[in-house]
Amino acid sequence: MTMLNPSQDRIASSFAGISLNAWRFLVIAAVAALVLIGLPFLLSGFQTSVLAKVIFWSIAALGLNILVGYNGQFSLGHSAFFAIGAYTMAILLSKTGIPYWAIVPMAGALCLVAGFLFGLPALRLEGHYLALATFALAVATPQLLKVDAFESWTGGVQGINDLDQPAAPFGLAFLTPDRWAYFFCLLWAVPLFAIAWNLLRGRTGRAIVAIRDNPIAAASMGINVSIYKSLTFGVSAMYTGIAGALSVVVTPFVSPDTFDFLISVSLLVAIVVGGVATLPGAILGAFFIQYVPTYADRISHAIPWAVYGVAIIAVVYFMPGGMVGFLRWFWLSVRRRLMPTRLVSTGRPGTG
């Protein structure tokens, strides 16, 4: 049996001075980029619009996952922040001359402040008490949007429906409004996921997870639990608010009844089905909440929500770690069977 000494093993595990793991990451990233760029040109306008919805739902699910999965706080009120982001985009588009691309960060900043301020009094609440407080926020927001005092801004019960879908910049005729909405959402999703990945891998991320695992131990290590919890709530709300603003770019219409409590439930389903405390889980969960209800309606027009519920139960039962957990298990199983174990020489005679 051929054995490799340590120097040969290092050469075999790299190519052109770059490790094989790095090459594997670059190849996967290149293939993913080609797929993401090419898909809108292979699909119809409606299918491209649905994919754009998947993108902003994944951003919103990522925001909730940061709060629930990584920090251990439970929220049923993220539909409120989604509504704030959407109405910020719609109001500023209809009332001012601010370009839509500049409104997105403004919506995110507004939700960051709102989430941080809401997180301060919520520090006294935990578990089901916090869930009830956030539930109250989700239920109250659509009603507040209908108040007569705000009707000149929010449009009241009718909402704001005189918006136009943004056209592609620089006169790019091959980018239809649906395609441009897709790429615009993608331009926001990629850096937002990269920021979340970098944030959660650093000291801040370790502090956030430490608070989730044991807040008393985290406080004893010098972590300001109150500030980190409030900031995490704010960052989570910011991601959801940006997703809400992007939703108006994809579908230029807002109405109070479209931001009901069901959005919060759907986001919670997305992170549980996709994988709690995982970044790819937000993407897989977004696909689930966007496509599965549609197919459930095709299976049965009479009881589509029952079919959807059965699908959720099946995923939770057979994939307790979510889709990401199942894919990891599947990959490790295939790798054990297909990849031979490399033998490294120990330098002792008689080994082999």
Image (cartoon, rainbow, N blue to C red):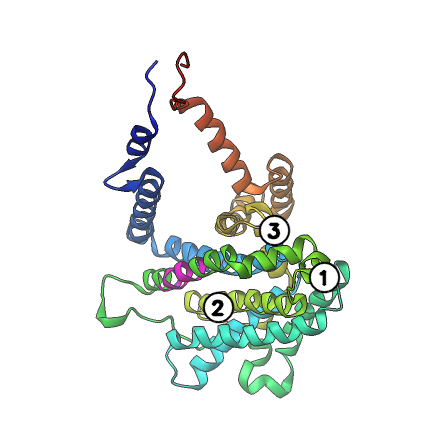
- Mark number for residue 99? none
Decide which of tag 1 and tag 2 comes sooner along the chain: 1
Residue corresponding to mark 2: 242
State the residue at coordinates (47%, 76%).
Answer: 89
Which residue occupies the extreme front position in the image? 348
Residue corresponding to mark 3: 269
Decide which of tag 3 and tag 2 comes sooner along the chain: 2
Q: Which residues are magenta?
A: 184-193
Disc 3 residue type (three-letter): Val
Quadrant that contains the C terminus: top left
SS category of the residue bearing label 3: helix
Q: Around disc 3, counting alpha carbons within 10 Å, would you say few (fewer than 14), some (14 to 19), or many (20 or more)?
A: some
Q: Is residue 66 left or right of residue 178?
A: right
User: Quadrant location of residue 256?
Assistant: bottom right
Q: Main secondary structure of the magenta part?
A: helix
Residue corresponding to mark 1: 131
Q: Tell me where residue 45 appears, x and y as whole percent.
A: 35, 57
Q: Is residue 116 above or below residue 268?
A: below
Q: Is residue 144 magenta?
A: no
Q: Is residue 154 above or below residue 181?
A: below
Quadrant that contains the N terminus: top left
User: Quadrant location of residue 147?
Assistant: bottom right
Q: How many marks?
A: 3
Tell which tag, 1 or 3, sits nearer the viewer.
1
Q: Around disc 1, counting alpha carbons within 10 Å, would you say few (fewer than 14), some (14 to 19), or many (20 or more)?
A: some
Disc 2 residue type (three-letter): Ile
Decide which of tag 1 and tag 3 comes sooner along the chain: 1
Label 1 – label 3 distance at C-alpha: 15 Å
Disc 1 residue type (three-letter): Ala
